[in-house]
Image: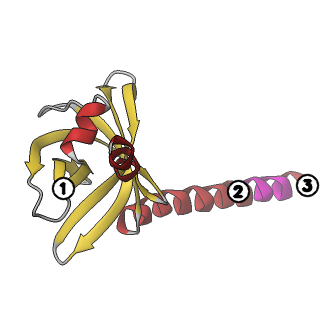
């Protein structure tokens, strides 16, 4: 009798662990639909958007969860100053904020990490991380004021 009760507790604990794990996985999906994004991706295209447009500067296009998404990095001069050199096919890690406007999605990058994704061990090996903004706003605003 005691052994079957002990077995019942094991099953209950395993069930609770499974529910907790499933909620974590579901929460990870919700973060993409919410505001915070943390993704490893590959650069599909690179664009320098001119100044009269909203979000002028360096943009990359990359697939995130099967969809092509515009990722705004920073003004081109700021990105170049801190060594952000990108090309089509580069592996990157982007941490940022997802912004939706109608059917289009843009990620405002808070930080970008350059490096290589190793398929053998499933790890991203960073060579450079540049922090672009925080809760107070983009760092290039302070940077341009210091240059004057």
Q: Residues within 10 Å of mark 3 (few under 14, many from 20)?
A: few
| Residue under pointer 2 | 11
Could you give the CA–CA distance between mark 2 and mark 1, rounded to whole angstroms?
A: 45 Å
The label on residue 119 is: none
Could you give the CA–CA distance between mark 3 and mark 2, rounded to whole angstroms?
A: 14 Å
Q: Is residue 67 left or right of residue 141?
A: left
Image: 42 above or below 65? above
> Where's the C terminus, which quadrant?
top left
The label on residue 70 is: 1
Q: Are the residues flagged by discs 3 and 2 in contact, CB closer than 8 Å? A: no
> Closer to the N terminus: mark 3 or mark 2?
3
Picture mark count: 3
The label on residue 2 is: 3
Q: Are the residues flagged by discs 1 and 3 in contact, CB closer than 8 Å? A: no
Q: Is residue 68 left or right of residue 20?
A: left
> Residue 132, image x and y in percent?
38, 46
Image point 40% across, 69% down: which residue?
34
> Closer to the N terminus: mark 1 or mark 3?
3
Asked which quadrant contains residue 24, the reply is bottom right
Range of residues picked out in magenta = 4-10
Q: Is residue 72 left or right of residue 24?
A: left
Could you give the CA–CA distance between mark 1 and mark 3, rounded to whole angstroms?
A: 59 Å
């Amino acid at each position: 009798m005691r052994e079957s009760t002990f077995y019942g507790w094991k099953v209950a604990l395993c069930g609770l662990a499974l529910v907790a794990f499933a909620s974590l996985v579901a929460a990870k999906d919700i973060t993409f639909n919410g505001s915070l994004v943390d993704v490893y991706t590959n650069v599909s295209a690179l664009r320098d958007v001119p100044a009269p447009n909203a979000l002028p500067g360096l943009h990359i296009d990359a697939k995130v969860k099967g969809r092509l998404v515009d990722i705004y990095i920073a003004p081109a001069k700021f990105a170049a100053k801190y060594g952000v050199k990108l090309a089509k096919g580069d592996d990157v890690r982007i941490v940022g904020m997802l912004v939706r406007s109608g059917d289009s999605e843009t990620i405002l990058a808070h930080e970008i990490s350059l490096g290589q994704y190793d398929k053998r061990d499933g790890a991203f090996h960073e060579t450079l991380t540049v922090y672009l903004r925080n809760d107070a706003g983009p760092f290039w605003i302070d940077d341009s004021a210091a240059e004057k």
